[in-house]
Image (spheres, rainbow, N blue to C red):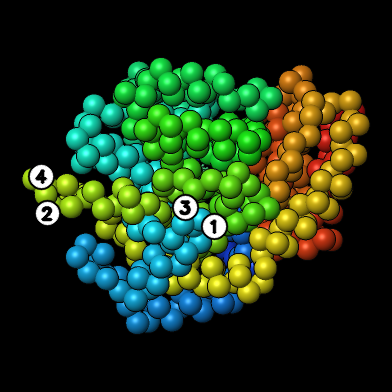
Amino acid sequence: MTNKIFHPYTTFSALKNTLPNMVRGEGIYLFDDAGNRYVDIVSSWWACALGHGHPKVVKAIQEQAAVLQHSITGSLTHPNVLALAERLAALMPTPERHSVFASDGCSAVEAAIKIAIQYWYNVGQPEKTWVIGMDQGYHGDSMGALGAGFVDGFHKPFEHAVSHPAKLPFPIDGDFEPGRKVIEAHRGKLAAVIVEPLCLGSAGMKIYPADYLKELADCCAENDVLLIIDEVAMGFGRTGKRFAFNHAGIDPDMVCLGKGLTAGYMPLSACVVKDKLYHTFTDEGEKDCTFYHGNTYAGHPIGCAAALAALDIYEAEGTVERGAEMAKKMKQWMQPMADLECVKELRFLGMIGVVELKPETKPLIPKIKQSLFEQGYLFRPLGTMFYLMPPLVISDDELKAAVYALQQTIEDFCE
Ligand SMILES: Cc1ncc(COP(=O)(O)O)c(C=O)c1O
């Protein structure tokens, strides 16, 4: 069959080969149409925390599809979306919150950006319109998200089409002071700051300390700037706590959730908004401050059913706690790679394990990736960096084998 797909994040060089055609998933594995089995070592773009085919999520989806497959949330509710909004509020440090629902991480971010801007309009400070992020931060691929998160390696063609008036520098040694200067200099214009908590994923798993987040939250509060934490990639246990911002003990104004919200089973996302902001979106004052923003599939009943099932499993199976324990083992098993001549550094954050190779290995990266693929591992290197971000349900043996395969393959090609 010809391939008429305009693929995301896929080079034309990669299309010279026939792409694997995945037909089934089970646990940490994907199976192609030739019966080959692959370890989904990046959790299908960081989403599938519970692996594939978890019977409880599958059942929840099937049952909901048979009862009510769609009903909008504009002026209507349905039981699943009511329950999910309640659950998400209860997961936050302070539960006085309402959730805007959307279908993917990017649209949750887009909602957060617009809520921040409209909040200041609602309270009579319409000049506060800037939403800025961290240098090389990533918040999705919509034009709004590119204004706050911009990865040079991906987004160059759009450089002149989006405005990013300022950026927080990536913290060197966790130093917040350069970031403070940016916020203080622009406080009159700043509606919000948005950051990926603890780890800039798409920029190459660049990790920074939790103390930075605490200082950022305090600085935003002191300068009348809202703080949006984008937990789309890190949320639901990836970093060893439920949310990455929990490491810093902060209570962000808005929290964006996606991917792990349904454990990757359905497209659903949310922006969980503090009531202090929510209550300004009223049409009962002098001006109409209704939030005229929404997506057709916002709060989709089947998506919400998948999310409720995933949240139940995270709790019942102690997924977050298990992931935190597993992370210690992954670090221990990966540590010997630090001694390889070709390795620049290892980085760890919860169930993220990174091996960054030295720049001179660049021509070898596609070969290492291909060899791992042939051994049944679906790695997606970023630059000269290989990372493990497996489903949190991976077993000791499966994880150890993946680490070993990566080390052996790097040694075969580089040492
Ligand atoms: C931190 C972060 N925010 C937002 C997004 C966008 O999510 P989606 O691809 O579901 O639109 C991503 C995707 O990788 C992400 O890593």
Instruction: Give the amino acid type for the residue marked by disc 3 in the picture.
Output: Leu
In x, y percent, where is residue 3? 47, 47
Q: Nearer the viewer, mark 3 or mark 4?
A: 4
Q: Which residue is mark 2?
A: 284
Total labels drawn: 4
| Horizontal and vertical percent position of residue 238 | 64, 52
Q: CA distance from mark 3 to mark 2?
A: 30 Å
Instruction: Tell me residue 231's x, y (percent).
Output: 52, 47
Q: Secondary structure beneath disc 2?
A: loop
Q: In the image, is the residue at mark 3 within 8 Å of ligand 1 by its beta carbon? A: no
Residue at image position (35%, 70%) is 82
Residue under numbered circle 3: 257
Query: Marks 2 and 1, Cα distance to the nearest angstrom?
Result: 37 Å
Residue 95 shows which numbered tag?
none
Residue drawn at (33%, 54%) of the image: 275
The amino acid marked with disc number 4 is Lys
Q: Are marks 3 and 1 in contact (CB under 8 Å)?
A: yes
Q: Which residue does the numbered mark 4 point to in the structure image? A: 287
Pick whichever of labels 2 and 1 is earlier in the sequence.
1
Q: Amino acid at mark 2?
A: Glu
Q: Are marks 3 and 2 in contact (CB under 8 Å)?
A: no
The answer, for residue 268, to whether it is visible in the render is no
Residue assigned mark 1 = 260
The CA distance from mark 3 to mark 4 is 30 Å
Q: Which dot, 3 or 2, sits closer to the camera?
A: 2
Q: Earlier in the sequence, mark 3 or mark 4?
A: 3
